[in-house]
Amino acid sequence: MSDHRTSCLPHRRTEYYGTFAFGAVILSCFAQFVFARRITGELWQVPATFGLGATYAALAILGDGIVDRWGLPWKRRIFLAMWIVVVAMIYLSPVRGFFGIMVLPLLSYGIFLFGWKGATASGLSLFAASIFVFGYYYGPNAMIEASMSYLAAFAFTAMFTVITKKALTAREQSEALRLELEVANQKLHAYAAQIEELATTRERNRLAREIHDGVGHYLTVVKTQLDAAAGLIGTDTAKARTNVEKAAKLTAEALDDVRRSVSSLKTDAVRAPLAEAVQHLASLGEPTATVTILGTPRQLPPATEHALFRATQEGLTNIRKHARATNALITLDFRDAQSVRLEMADNGVGANVANGDGFGLHGMAERLALLGGTVNAGNRLEGGFALSVEVPAPQPAPTR
C-alpha cells in the first residue's frame, strides 16, 4: 500500500503544479477586467470571455480525471478543445495585449503531451494565433511588435517546460528503476532461499547415503556374525566366541566410520588406500569376497575414493543381506588412465530377492552421478547378481 502511494506522488504533484499554473495565469489575465483603464469591444464579449475562461479552466483542472477515466486518447481531444477555447477567448476578449499569455499553459501542456514534432507544431500554432490577433485588430506593425514581446515569453515557457519534462522523466525512470531493483532483490531473496533449501536437501541426502552405506553396511555384517554365533553357541563355543569378537571389532569400526562421516572432509584423510580398504571390506562377514586388482593402484581424488569405497560397501551389504550367495567377486580395475572401474558379482538368487532398485543403489547412483560416474546392475545369465561402477579419474601427468 505504501509503495502504491509513493509511486503516485510524482503524478499527483505534476497535476497540482499544472492546475496551479493554469489557475494563476487565468486569474492574472481576468484581473485586467478589474484594473484595466480601457476595455474595447461590445458588452456581450465580456460574459462570452468569462464563459470561455471558465471552460478553459474546467478543461485544465478536470482533464487528467477525464483521461484517467476514459483513456489516453482523450488527452488529444482535450488539448484540441482547449486550443479552440483559448484562441476564441483571446480573439473575443475586450482586453488586448497581456491577455494573450493565456496560451502559455497550453503551450506547456502540448510539450508534455506530444513528441518534439507535435509540440513544435502546437507551439507555433499558439504563437501565430496570439500574434495574429494584434494584426487583426491593429494592423501588421502591431503584429510585428507583439511578436517581439511574445517571443521571449514563449521561449522561456518552452525552455522551462522542456527542462521540467526531462526532470520528471528522469524521476519516473529512477522510480521505475528503483521498483525493478526491488523486484530483482525480492527474486534474489527467493532464489537464495531456494538455493539454501536445495543445499539443505542435498546435504540431507548425502547424510542419508553416508548412514545407509556406512553404518548400514557394518550393522548388516555385525548381525551376520551374531546370527552365526547364536547358531554355534551350543555346539562350537570357540567359533561362536570368534564370531562375537569379530562382531565387536566391526562395531568399533562402525563407530570409527560414523566419526569419519561426522568430520566429513576428514573422512578420506584417515581411511586406508582404496585397494587396501576394499580388501578389508571383503574380508568382513560371509561370504568372504575374492578381490582382484587390475593395473597399478593410483591415488584418486578423495571424493572419488570415497564414492568407490561406499559402492563396495553397498554391494557387499546387498550380497550378504539378500543374495544368499556362497561366493562373491570384487574387481578393481585401474588399467584405464582416464577412469576406474569397480565390478562385483555373486552366485546368489539375483535381483528378484536382492531388490536391486532400493535406496542403496539409488543413493550410489546419485553419489557417482555428481562425479560424472555411472552405475549398471542386473542379474547374470549364469545366475546371481552383478554390479558395475565406472567413475572418471584421469591419471595425473608425470612431472618433469
Image (cartoon, rainbow, N blue to C red):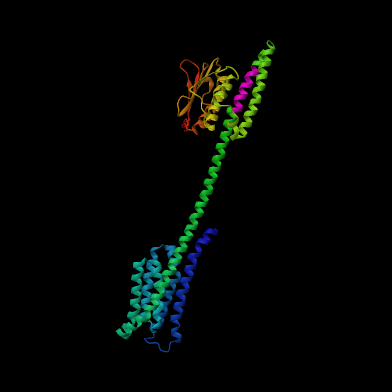
As drawn, 187 above or below 267 = below
**Membership of 248 in magenta stretch:** no
* Residue 48 appears anywhere in the view: no
Q: Which residue is drawn at 49% across and 32% down?
A: 369
Q: Nearer the viewer, residue 164 or 257?
A: 257
Q: Is the magenta stretch mostly helix, strand or loop?
A: helix
Q: Residue at x 52, y 61 (%)?
A: 6
**Membership of 224 in magenta stretch:** yes
Q: Is residue 32 shown left or right of residue 125?
A: right
Q: Nearer the viewer, residue 259 or 105?
A: 259
Q: Quadrant of the N terminus?
A: bottom right
Q: In which quarter of the image is residue 135?
A: bottom left
Q: Which of 279 and 151 is in front in this view?
A: 279
Q: Residue furthest bottom?
A: 37
Q: What stretch is highlighted in magenta?
A: 214-227
Q: Which residue is drawn at 55% across and 41% down?
A: 197
- Picture coordinates of residue 366 (x, y %)? 51, 32
- Picture coordinates of residue 282 (x, y %)? 57, 20
Q: Quadrant of residue 305?
A: top right
As drawn, 202 above or below 162 = above
- Picture coordinates of residue 100 (x, y %)? 39, 80
Q: Is residue 235 shown left or right of residue 217?
A: right
